[in-house]
Amino acid sequence: MAPSLSRPDQADTARAPSGPGQPTPRTALVTGASSGIGAAVAKRIAAERGWRLVVSGRDQRRLAEIAGLTSSIPLRADLATSAGVEHLVTGALDAVGHIDLLVAAAGVGWAGPLPSMPAAAVDEVLTVNLTAVAHLVRLVLPGMLAAGRGQIVLVGSTAGTYGVRQEVVYSAAKAGIEALAESLRHELRDTGVRVLHVVPAAVDTPFFERRGTPYTRGVPRPLPPDRVAEALWDALVHGREEVFAPRWLGLPRRLRGVAPGLFRRLASRFG
């Protein structure tokens, strides 16, 4: 059975750090933790007792700041290479011994017409957003399967669920995350390892600044990253397999199922 996650109203004995006669702390690895959703998730986990936290990101200075705020272990890693992913997981396991919770929140974007997208940008978007995530899961799963428990959280995007013009490769990568989550659930059934797919819309983070193109849509309005982190944690506590942030953005998927023609007309106009 997957480990239960502490709620703020649970007894302190269920959330206490390890010590004589006390349970071993649960451990979490959060990627993309130097800013945005990853940083917010790290802070949310740190608010719970009984957790040891490893945070990863590319920006050494910001990562050190988050580590200081969350009493976590910082491991700088470049997930654009498989060697970087392996180095991260090896370092995390050396630091904490095992991983109970993986939150794959690292991501990069690019916006513009597909023909104008540089080949290097195609490779980076696909590698960081999808290939690296598959490698992360591949490397942490053996320990979770041996323990008979674990939580894997994959941060996707509504771009991957519905498709977005001028974000073709990013949308494709995040669609791959959705398929990865669904396939993993089938593969890991009855193993004690659970998979959560988090599907945020636009989030008020440095993501858009780093990709070089601002967010210009009026709807949905960008969410604060701490709201996504709270939705993620609530979904973990309640054993959900998928959560949209905001939740109403799960409705178009139902429309696509019952009226695909209408969905595509609306998507063509607003997507």
Image: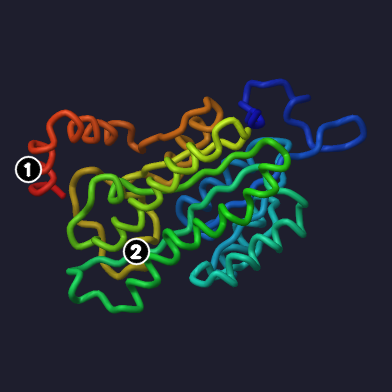
Q: Which residue is mark 1?
A: 265
Q: Quadrant of residue 255?
A: top left
Q: Amino acid at mark 1?
A: Arg
Q: Quick one: 138 or 51, which is closer to the camera?
A: 138
Q: Residues within 10 Å of mark 1 (few under 14, many from 20)?
A: few
Look at 20% across and 69% down and name the residue there: 114
x then y, percent, for residue 45: 61, 41
Look at 67% across and 42% down and name the residue there: 145
x then y, percent, for residue 131: 46, 62
Single out the residue that lies furthest toward the front. 187
Query: How far is mark 2 from mark 1, CA to CA?
Result: 26 Å
Q: Quick one: 18 or 150, which is closer to the camera?
A: 150
Q: Is residue 152 left or right of residue 257?
A: right
Q: Amino acid at mark 2?
A: Gly
Q: Considering the image in quadrants, where does the N terminus appear?
A: top right
Single out the residue that lies furthest toward the right. 20
Q: Is residue 234 left or right of residue 222?
A: right
Q: Residues within 10 Å of mark 2 (few under 14, many from 20)?
A: many
Mark 1 secondary-structure assignment: helix
x then y, percent, for residue 254: 23, 30
Mark 2 secondary-structure assignment: loop
Look at 34% across and 48% down and name the residue there: 157
Q: Tell me the number on the disc at residue 109.
A: 2
